[in-house]
Image: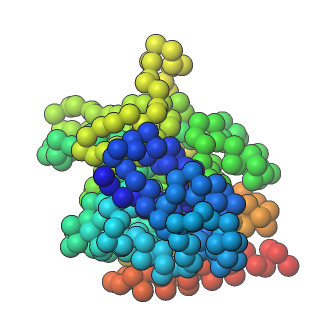
C-alpha cells in the first residue's frame, strides 16, 4: 500500500489523481491533501477520501475547514506544513500539482526526502531545473513526469537513450490556433480559457492559448531528459491524440497515443514501471478525425520563442520568464492587461532583469521575487 500526498488536490490534476487512486483502493491510500483557499471543495474531498492530514495555504480557509472537517482529519496551515507533508516519513508518493511557482518549495521538499515525485508542476523545473534534478539524484527520489508530453517521452525512452536524435513535443495550438493575429488583441479571459481539447486550470489554459505552456514544457524537457534546446522541437497537432515523438538515429520514431485525458499520465506515474486501469477509454483510431501536424507560427505565438530564448540563455533566464508570465497571466485574467500584453511583459522583464547564477533554492526564490517586481512595474503604468 502506497501513501499518497496530493498537493493541489482541489485542482484539475488533483481531482483526476483522486479519481485514479479511488479505482485501486488495494494499492493506494490518500494520506494527505493540500489546497490554497478552496476549503469548501476540500471539505467534500475530506468526507469522501478521509485523508490523515490536510494543509491549506490560506489561514482563514484552514480555520473554516477545521470547524467542519470530519473527525480524524488533521487540518494544518501554511508553507512549512506543506513541506512537512511532502517530506513526511509516512508519505510514499507526492503528486506535485500546485499551480505556478507556489509549488516550488514543496516539490523540493519531496525531492530532497527521496519520495516518488509525480511532477505536474512544471514550473518547479523551469525555476530550479538543475537544483531539483540534483536534489532528486542525491536523495534517490524518482521524478516521474505527469505532463502528458513528457510522460509520453518518458514511456518511449524506457529502452534507454542510446541513438536518441531529437524529441518533438506535440502542442494542440490552443483555442487561437486559427485566429488571425490581429484579432488576438481583443480576446477575453473566457475565450482564452476555453481550450478545445483539454479541461485544465485557468493559468495553464491561458498558457496554452499563448503557447507559453509549450515553451515551459520545452524547458521542462531540457532538464528532465538532459537534452539541449536544439534537440527539442515543437509540432502542432490539434487533435491531441499523439502525445509527442522520440526520433532515433536508425530512422525509427516512437510515440505514445491516447485520448486527451490526464488520467493516463497520472496513472502511469502512480503505477510505474507497471500499468493499471486509469478509467480512460481506449483509443479507436478508426473513429478519429484525421490527424494533422503543423509547424508553430513563431510570429503569432511569441511566448514560445521567448521560452526558447530563455532556455538558450540559461541560468536565471527561465525563472525570470516564468515569474513574468505568472504575473502577466494573472493580470490578464483580472482584465488589467490584454492578451498580447502577456508576451510584451515577459520580453521587457527578461530585458531588464540581468542574468544571474542560481546555485541555491534561496537564490531561485530571490530571482522569482525580483522578476515579479519588475513585471508588476511594467504592468502598473497601464493601470493608471
Ligand atoms: N490541468 C492539466 O491538464 C495539466 C496538465 C499538465 C500539467 N499541469 C500542471 O499541473 C499543475 C496544476 O495544474 P491544474 O490545471 O491542476 O491547476 P488548477 O486546477 O488551477 O489547480 C491548482 C491547485 O493548486 C492550489 N494552489 C493554487 N495556488 C496555491 C498556493 N499559493 N499555495 C498552495 N496551493 C495553491 C489550488 O488550490 P485552490 O483550489 O484552493 O485554489 C489547486 O488545488 C500546473 O503546474 C500545470 O501546469 C496541468
Q: How many marks?
A: 0
Which quadrant of the structure image shows residue 89? bottom left
Q: Quadrant of the C terminus?
A: bottom right
Image quarter for residue 238?
top right
Residue 266 visible? yes
Eyeballing the image, is 231 above or below 332?
above
- Between residue 104 and residue 303, name the one nearer to us: 104
Name the spot of residue 74 as percent of width and height, x first.
53, 71
Q: Nearer the viewer, residue 109 or 245?
A: 109
**What's the colour scheme?**
rainbow
Residue 380 on image: x %, y %: 76, 79
Give the residue at the far front of this rendering.
Answer: 71
Q: Residue furthest left?
A: 162
In the image, residue 350 sits, relative to residue 181, either above or below, namely below
Q: Nearer the viewer, residue 113 or 160?
A: 113
Residue at 39%, 61% in the rendered image:
94
Amino acid at each position: 500500500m502506497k501513501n499518497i500526498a496530493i498537493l493541489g488536490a482541489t485542482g484539475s490534476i488533483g481531482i483526476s489523481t483522486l479519481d485514479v487512486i479511488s479505482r485501486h483502493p488495494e494499492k493506494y491510500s490518500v494520506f494527505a491533501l493540500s489546497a490554497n483557499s478552496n476549503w469548501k471543495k476540500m471539505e467534500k474531498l475530506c468526507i469522501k477520501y478521509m485523508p490523515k492530514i490536510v494543509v491549506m495555504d490560506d489561514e482563514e480557509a484552514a480555520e473554516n475547514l477545521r470547524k467542519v472537517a470530519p473527525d480524524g482529519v488533521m487540518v494544518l496551515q501554511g508553507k512549512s506544513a506543506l513541506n512537512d507533508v511532502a517530506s513526511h516519513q509516512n508519505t510514499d508518493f507526492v503528486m506535485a500539482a500546485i499551480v505556478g511557482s507556489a509549488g516550488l518549495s514543496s516539490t523540493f521538499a519531496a525531492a530532497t526526502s527521496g519520495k516518488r515525485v509525480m511532477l505536474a508542476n512544471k514550473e518547479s523545473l523551469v525555476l530550479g531545473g538543475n537544483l531539483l534534478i540534483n536534489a532528486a539524484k542525491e536523495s534517490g527520489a524518482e521524478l516521474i513526469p505527469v505532463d502528458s508530453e513528457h510522460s509520453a517521452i518518458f514511456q518511449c525512452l524506457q529502452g534507454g537513450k542510446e541513438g536518441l536524435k531529437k524529441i518533438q513535443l506535440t502542442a494542440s495550438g490552443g483555442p487561437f490556433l486559427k485566429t488571425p493575429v490581429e484579432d488576438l488583441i481583443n480576446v477575453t479571459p473566457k475565450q482564452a480559457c476555453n481550450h478545445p481539447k483539454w479541461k485544465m486550470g485557468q493559468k495553464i489554459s491561458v498558457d496554452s492559448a499563448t503557447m507559453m505552456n509549450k515553451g515551459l514544457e520545452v524547458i521542462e524537457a531540457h532538464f528532465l531528459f538532459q537534452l539541449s534546446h536544439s534537440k527539442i522541437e515543437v509540432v502542432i497537432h490539434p487533435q491531441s491524440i499523439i502525445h509527442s515523438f522520440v526520433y532515433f538515429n536508425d530512422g525509427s520514431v516512437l510515440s505514445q497515443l491516447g485520448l486527451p485525458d490526464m488520467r493516463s499520465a497520472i496513472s502511469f506515474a502512480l503505477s510505474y514501471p507497471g500499468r493499471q486501469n486509469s478509467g480512460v477509454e481506449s483509443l479507436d483510431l478508426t473513429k478519429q478525425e484525421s490527424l494533422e501536424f503543423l509547424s508553430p507560427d513563431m510570429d503569432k505565438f511569441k511566448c514560445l520563442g521567448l521560452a526558447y530564448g530563455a532556455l538558450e540563455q540559461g541560468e536565471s533566464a527561465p525563472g525570470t520568464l516564468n515569474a513574468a508570465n505568472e504575473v502577466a497571466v494573472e493580470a490578464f485574467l483580472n482584465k488589467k492587461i490584454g492578451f498580447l500584453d502577456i508576451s510584451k511583459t515577459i520580453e521587457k522583464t527578461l530585458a531588464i532583469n540581468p542574468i544571474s547564477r542560481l546555485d541555491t533554492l534561496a537564490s531561485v526564490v530571490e530571482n522569482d521575487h525580483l522578476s515579479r517586481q519588475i513585471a508588476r512595474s511594467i504592468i502598473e503604468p497601464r493601470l493608471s
